[in-house]
Amino acid sequence: MNFCSLKLGMAILSLLSAFVSSGQIVDTSYWQGWYETPADVVRVDKWNETGWWTAAGVMSTGLVIYSQDAQIRQSFQSWRTDGSDQFSRYVAEPIGSGLYSLGGTAIAFGVGYFTDDAKLQRTSLQAFKAFVLTGGATVLLKQLTHRPRPYESDDPYTWLGPYAITGDNDAFPSGHTSTAFAVASVFAHSYREQPWVGVSVYSLATLAGLSRIHDDVHWGSDVFFGAALGWYVGRTIVQNDRKLWVLPTGNGVYLSYSFD
């Protein structure tokens, strides 16, 4: 997550708002559930038994990876070449920065708009929301934990805690990975009947995550937990995105809330 990603996101939001304010989109179902608070997304009290078992599996796997962070870093750095640096810089890293994921989401929305594909339009808007909410949660966790990045400390088990609001020592979790997986999760869960969609988007998100370890800016566990966070937020938005509508109009913003 960086300033360039934020500017790109705002540009996309402005474009979508312009479509609506000009009356080009009249079906408000496209905008249903555009915004919900992070608390609405989390709602762990609503988890069923499967959800808790999934969380336990994620935590257990993450702890195993955490115990091997130093070895994982050493392995990735030993494989690093000029060619892999170029691939990471121009292909993999931009996926997580938002350049490709937000750009691809905007293109998908445009395709859905011009082909009257309501599902694609709605999914694109959900993906954008997932990117924003996941990015916000990631920044909060970074400021609460302040874990040094690999190039800042050779010790993967150092956690400095919430000592200040700063961009230093902000490894956990990986923002590139969390937002890439958030967008991927929305598309994968929305198009479950087409497995190739999930395979494609998750493969791209995985490339973004691996590039962060390759570039020595994140530990393996930063990437794993970032992926888990993004996957969960995206999945939850697709499943529960039903209550609050926010519709920008030429005269302001229209709000509608359902208590169902």
Image (cartoon, rainbow, N blue to C red):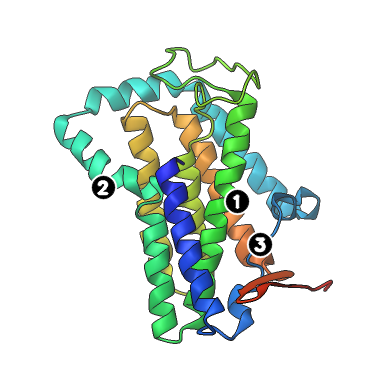
In this view of the protein, can residue 187 be seen by the observer? no
Q: CA distance from mark 2 to mark 3?
A: 31 Å
Question: In front here: 55 or 187?
Answer: 187
Which residue sits at x=63%, y=36%?
A: 140
Q: Give the residue at mark 1.
A: 133
Q: Position of residue 231 (x, y in %)?
A: 54, 52
In this view of the protein, can residue 236 be seen by the observer? yes
Task: Characterize the local packing of mark 3: few (<14), some (14-19) or many (20 or more) Cα atoms within 10 angstroms.
Answer: many
Q: Amino acid at mark 3?
A: Tyr
Q: Considering only order in the chain, which callout, 3 or 2, is on the residue closer to the N terminus? A: 3
Q: Amino acid at mark 1?
A: Leu
Element under disc 3 = loop
Q: Give the residue at mark 3.
A: 35
Q: CA distance from mark 1 to mark 2?
A: 24 Å
Q: Which mark is residue 91?
A: 2
Q: Considering only order in the chain, which callout, 1 or 3, is on the residue closer to the N terminus? A: 3
Which residue sits at x=44%, y=13%?
A: 153
